[in-house]
Structure formats: C-alpha cells, structure tokens
Amino acid sequence: MTLTDSSLTDLVEAQVLERVLHEALRRGGDFAEIFAEDRSSSSIFLDDRKVEELSTGRDRGAGIRVIVGETTGFAHTADLSEKGLLSAAEAAAAVAREGGGGVRKTALLRQASEHQQVGTLPSTVPKSAKVDLLLRADDASRSAGGAIVQVSAGYGDSRRRILVANSDGLLTDDDRVRTRLFVTCVASGDGGLQTGFHSLAYTLGYEMFDEHPVEEVAAEAARRAITKLQARPAPSGVLPVVLKSGSGGILFHEACGHGLEADHILKDSSAYTGRIGQVVASPGVTLVDDGTLGPNWGSLVIDDEGRPTQRNVLIRDGVLTDYMWDYLRARKEGRTSSGNGRRQSYQDLPMVRMTNTFLLAGDEDPDEIVSQTPNGVYVAQLGGGQVNTATGDFVFGMTEAYLIENGQITEPLRNANLIGNGPDVLSKIDAIGNDFDMSSGTCGKDGQSVSVGCGQPTLRVAGITIGGTASA
Amino acid sequence: MPDLLSLARRVLEQATADEEVEVYVSHGRETSVRVFEGAIEQLETAESAGVGVRVISAGRQGFSYVGALDEPAAKEALIEARDNARFATVDEHAGLASPDGVEPPVLDLWREELVSFPTDDRVALALELERRVRSGDSRIRQVVSSDYVDGFGETAIATSRGIEVTDRQTGCYLFVHAVAGDGDDTQTGFGYSVGRAPGELDLEAAAADAVDRATRLLGARKARSAKLTAVLDRRVTATLLGILSGTLSGEEVVKGRSLFAGRIGEQVGVGELTLIDDPTNPLAYGASQHDAEGLACRCNSLIAGGELKSFLYDTYAGRLAGTTSTGSAVRGGFRTTPSVGAQALSLQPGKLDQPEIIAAVGEGFLVQSITGVHSGVNPVSGDFSVGAEGLMIRGGELAEPVREVTIASTIQRMLQHVVAVGSDVEWLPGAATGVTLAIDEIAMSGS
C-alpha cells in the first residue's frame, strides 16, 4: 500500500501557500519557505511485567522561515488556517527590516515524490497486538536465564506527513513511517547488577516485526546483561581496539561526521575546515552519508527542505572529498544542497544533519583482524557518545566489550568510556574487515533530535584511550 | 493570554464518575536571537501550547496529548486516553495525587519586564556578548554563536481529585561558544548567564568565562595516568548532582535500579556532605510553587552529614514504596506523563572558595568539563568513567592544561572520598546548583 492518497497538500491549498509566501517576502527577503507537518505517534512502555502506559499524541503545525542576506527569521504556528499561517509569516519576516523588497509572486509547481512503501501502517494495528509484543519481549528476556531480575521494554511508532513550499516555486510532500522497539534487562549476580540493552529501529511500518522477531531483540538484551555479570573492570590506558561490524558506526558519525557538516565548516569550527583534497584518514577508509538506503533508520525520500536525498561520498580512500550541505549553507557557497537539511519538527529551523553514515567494507577477514591483535579490547556494542566538533575530541561508552589476549577474545569487561580524537582515530585505522552492519541511533544537535543510521565493517584502531579502572 | 485553567476545567467536565482524570495545559513563548560576526544570524519566535490528559480507570492508566489549545481536540484527547487505559496492566498503585494539605510556597517567578522586552534590545545583548568575547583575548579565533534567549511559560492542572493550580514563570539566558587558537591548537569554551529577567543577566561574566575557558586549555596534552585528587569545577559538580538525583529517585529505588536501595540511615558519604532538593528557593532555576501533579513543592533533605535520609517520590512511586509524594513530580511538558525528578538540588556549601581549595589540595587535577556522562555512569552499579579536560594542580596552583583523559571511580567511593565542598555557590540552568567539589582517589587515564 502506498500513502499517496493522503498527502499533506490536501491540508493546505496551494493558493493559500502562495499567498503566505507572498506575505513572508512582502518586506523584502531573498527566500521564504513553509514547512507544514501533521505528526501522530503512539508509544507503549512495559516495566517490571506491567504495561505502565499507552500514550498517543497528535501535533500539527507549520514553520515559516524568511532569509534576508545572512539573516534567517523563523516563526511557527499550530494554526494551519490562512490566518494562522499569515501571522507566522509576518513574525518570520520581522528580520527584513528595510522593507520595500518589492512584490514577488510565487507560482508553486508540485513535484511528486515517491513516498516510502509501507507494508502495514502501525495505526491500523490493534493496540492490544502492540501490548502483546512487549509481553512477548518480557517473556523472552526472562527465559534467557534466572539471573534476569528486571525487564523493561518500549514500543514506538510515528507517522509524519510533511509539506514543503518555497519561494523558488517548489511544492512537495512526504509521508514517513517509523517503528521501533527496545529492551533493557538487569541481571543480578555476585558482582552486583548489570544492564543489557538492545533495540530495533527502522523506517518501516509494523511489518518490521515479520523480519525481526521481538524475541531476538529481547534475548540479545538479556545475553548482554548476563555476560557482564562475569565482567572485570575495563583497563585504563591506550590500547588497540577492534570494533565489531555495526557496533561502532556511531563513533564515526560523532567524531568525523559532525565535523563534515557545512554549518561547522563555514564557521571555521571544525577540524576539517579547508581540508578538501587532503589525506584525513588511513588508506582504504571511505566514509559515506546516504539517505536513500532502504529501510535504515536515517533514510528519507526527501529532506526537510524538500530536496531528494542522495549518496554523498565524504572521504574516499583516505582523502576528504566533500562536506554535507543544506539549502542555506549551499546557497552561501553557490552550490546545491546535498539533501542533508533536516529538522526535528515544524517548530525547528532546518540545519545540516546526517542521514545514514557509514564506513565501507575492506577486504580483511574479521577473525584474522582479532587473531592478529596480540592484546587489546574487542568492542561488540558502543553506547552513546559526545563530540566537540571544533577539536574532534570524543567520548563513547562501551556497553559490550571484551579483552583480547594473545589474539583471542577472552573476558567480558564492565562498561567504560573510550576517549579520543576523531581525525586521529581515522588515521589510526590499520585493518578493515570485509563484513558490514548498520545500527540505529538518535542524533542530537543544537537541541534537535533526528533519527540516524550508522554503520561500519569490523575494523581495528591502533590505539584509543580506555577509561577503565584497572591498570592496562 | 489564554485562560488555561478554564480550558482544563472544561475538558475535566467530560470525566465520568468511574475514572480519575488529570488535565495538564501549558502555554509558552520563546524568542531567541543568534548573532554571528556582528549581524543577526537567526531570529526565532516559538510559541508552543498543548494539552495532556491522563485517565486512570480501574487501576489502569492511559495518556494522550494534542499540540494545540483547542477545546474539541483536547476533549478528543480525553477519549483517546480513556481508550489507551484499557490496554494497561491493572496496577493497584496507579492514581492521581490527592490534595495533601501542604501549603505551596509563595514565589514570584514572573518578571513583566521580560514579556515586554524589545527585540532590538535582545539583539543588542547578543551582539555585545559576541563583541566582548572577540575582543577579550587575541587568541579568540571564532565566536561560533552568541545567543540571547528569553521566554515565559504558564501551566494549569485540574484533576478529578480536586486539584486546581496554576503556575507561571519567566526566564532568559545568554550563551556564547568561543573557539581559541594558537598555531595548530584549537580549544573551545562556553560562557552563560541565566536570570528571570534581562536585568539579572551578567553579560560580562559570561563573556569572561567563555574566553578564559577556551584560552586556558590551549596547549593541552594528554596527561600520564595516575590516581589523584580531582577538583570539580562548579558546573561539573552540578552535572554530578544530576546523576546522583537519578539514584535518589524513589521509583528507581523501589524497582531495584539504584545503588542506594535499602540504605536509608547508612553513612553513604563523608560528614561534610549534605544534599537537599529545594524548589522553594526562588534563586533556583528549577523553583516552582507546585510540582507536575499540582502538589506543593517542598524542601527535601536527601543526605545530611553523610547519612542517607530519604528519596524523592511522586504520587505513584510513593504508593509503590508505601509512603507519600514528596512533591517531586516533574514532566517534560504536555506531551509526557509526570515522573519522579529532582527540581533544585544543592550541596550545603563549605568554607573555602575554589582558589583556596586548589591551594589546600596542593597536587591534583582541576576538572573544567566532563563528557560522556550518559554512557559513562551506571546508576545501578555506580560505575563512573567520563572524559575530562582541565588543568593540573601543582604546588597549590593551576599548572599545565590537560585534554583527552578519562576520570573514573564509582559513585559510592566518590561520596566517601569528598575532601572539600566549596563556598562558591553558582545558580545554573537545570535542576542542580554548582559548587566546587574536591574528591580524592580518582583514577585518571591518559598516556
């Protein structure tokens, strides 16, 4: 089933949009844009065998921006009537002080975008079936072992119908459906309590669970918690680190990707400013951002400025080839957007954001990468992280990791942070596996959260600082 | 301004006799100005409003919200919440707050001058902040952003248990992000100032802070791994208190997810350690007359003289633990249900300010900022390992800058190893106040 039957263009008529864009540019200004959105979502949370709550919500509104030279004005409204939109347009236009910009008429030309194909719209699935999913997750986690003492699980789905109209005459829309599930387990043993987490998140409808049974997610979360009961404190100091495929893509998203966003570049607040054409990574390292990658969590048909997403090669074989761009930053440089303009909701301005960001696979056998590492740490799951884009310094949590001793993966380690510098790590990658996997995450920037995908093959970094408590 | 309480009452009238209903209505406006290189980069006006409805029927809870002050849509949300409740598990502890007779503090958190503050003056503040940072030191290479943000918020809660309250407050802040450079070396520093009205902001201090923080880290290197005394800067302590508050949530405790479970009455820290959560103090950014369920806010003593005194509870957690709410329900706006949280944590200040503590410590590490807090701290096991940058302390004075190290311990050990609490209280945005804190036996990992 396709969703073209319910496009948002039905929500606000084209003539109204044209009149609102006209109002937005009445006092001058180079560019005006309307982003309208109708979002419905549902979530269920299960904790300690109880369905604590089923929650549903609806948000509808429009954000209007006006660009005058280097200045952007922005206002939003939950009132999608012509009156509401005109009043937001007037507020956004307040930055165009000079006035007398002349009359500009916009004739909108609708550009059809092929919407995401959805198997089963989550809103058509009975609430009781979604509740049942979480109860199954709880059962599956508990049956993984008697050490599991607590299970919590969450389900969420959202449908965002968006419309973008701008003074360049663009009128387009999109219909995005996302579904996710997560399970957290607490295991109890002699060494105290340990937690394990696993999640599933795709740009898919409810059919996601046909391919990814909830029991597998639950069992994986339980396994992580139980494994860590035997864990010893992580070492402290600099060691070689092998990242399992799909475990550490977030590191490259955070520590390299953010520094390649054109807003940081144009403000000279990135370690990668002015380095196009230079070697910034080990040979064989190719970093890509691609919003077109099927059902991955960061996929989008069009970005939140109405531009189709595309595959952007950022680093090719160690050499920096390009940055990521949104409309505003691309306009400054006289080029086109790379389809990376995103926003959390109609209440936010778009900015340069990643979609699915990943390192391409190499040709080494993942097992050999481990066996050729005399001593080090094997990371099977990285948790959240943080980066200073100006310096490239980052920190990440290891939520499933093991010691490598004499080329063998041995004892599990307790959670600890990895700390390092993005540009430095890229040039210290000394082995790239021939496998590949992706994972999902939520990326926060300037107070806005968006869904992103991250991926990488198994690879080794010659040395990263591990912030454990045991001496290395 | 819209009459939020009447809207809440009109929605509440739709409640049936066999259900409990809570209607939470909020409305706020935020204006933000960002300048860059002497010109306005962004000027945003954001008005947000909505209604969240909670229904509890036969021990089952359901919730729904709508992002508009629209009476028919809010009544629809009630119907939707009622339907959602059918799918929840019966929980004998589910229920709304009952009026408990505690008088709310009388706080004046509203400044009319903020509401009528002209846009030109907002822009002027952001521009002046940027100018001061740029001219503050020749090594300041960039001011990535200089922001002035102000806003107000008002809420109304009406419930079928007879609670009817309204709250409102104003707030504003200045925030600046500076980059300093020296040769190939780059460092960043942030400065900010918060207040309830523009007149309460300290622009000069915010600018000086950003300049100082960015420039003093220039030349920073990785330090040698060592076990040492860490002196936490005020903002770092506030972050640490935020972590601690999660472990003092009565709900986490009763569910076995806190390292403090079953330890009331125990000496969990050194005698100098006294921690309160006091939203009745109007100086605190998190001050409020009522909590997110409409009960009076109150001052709660959590740790006194190192002894664990009590946990924080909302109505549900209180019932679960066989006690009552401590007025500690918080919520992230109309889109979510209430949960337990700290509102205004602070440590009882000691006698020495930061320079005096540094002198007394002699040898150690002044932690200017930490990163990776969410991934690096486990509230159940107490494991603590975060990224850090700052300055070494040698001979009682600040010495060379340090970056890319981690500091690690456990929360349990840290509380037992506090060697000094500063006298330098700083009111910060968020739910915790800052004060310098020195802790020994910290493992620093570097080279």
Image (cartoon, grey):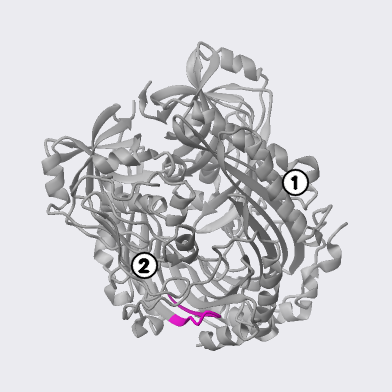
Q: Is residue B390 above or below residue A77?
A: above
* Comparing labels 2 and 1, the label whose residue is closer to the camera: 2
Residue type marked 1: Pro
x and y, in percent, of residue B442 in the image = 28, 35
x and y, in percent, of residue B12 in the image = 60, 83
Q: Is residue A205 left or right of residue A96?
A: right
Q: Which mark is residue A295?
A: 1
Kindly report the secondary structure that dominates the magenta region of the rendered protein.
Answer: strand
Secondary structure, mark 1, is loop
**Tag 1: Cα neighbours inside 10 Å, few (<14), some, or many (≥20)?**
some
Quadrant for residue B130, please give it.
bottom left
The residue at 12%/54% (across/down) is: B351
Mark yes or no: residue B404 visible. no
Secondary structure, mark 2, is loop
Which chain does the numbered disc 1 sit on?
A
Q: Is residue B421 left or right of residue A123?
A: left
Q: Is residue B104 left or right of residue A380?
A: left
**Tag 2: Cα neighbours inside 10 Å, few (<14), some, or many (≥20)?**
many
* Separation of marks 2 and 1 at Cα, in angstroms: 41 Å
Residue span colored magenta: B152-166
The residue at 34%/46% (across/down) is: B263
Quarter containing the C terminus of chain B: top left
Front residue of B261/A40: it is B261
x and y, in percent, of residue A140 in the image = 68, 39
Residue type marked 2: Gly
Q: Is residue A368 above or below residue B65?
A: above
Front residue of A443/A407: it is A407
Front residue of B22/B318: it is B318
In the picture of the structure, the residue carrying the numbered disc 2 is B286
Which chain does the numbered disc 2 sit on?
B
Q: Is residue A274 left or right of residue A301?
A: left
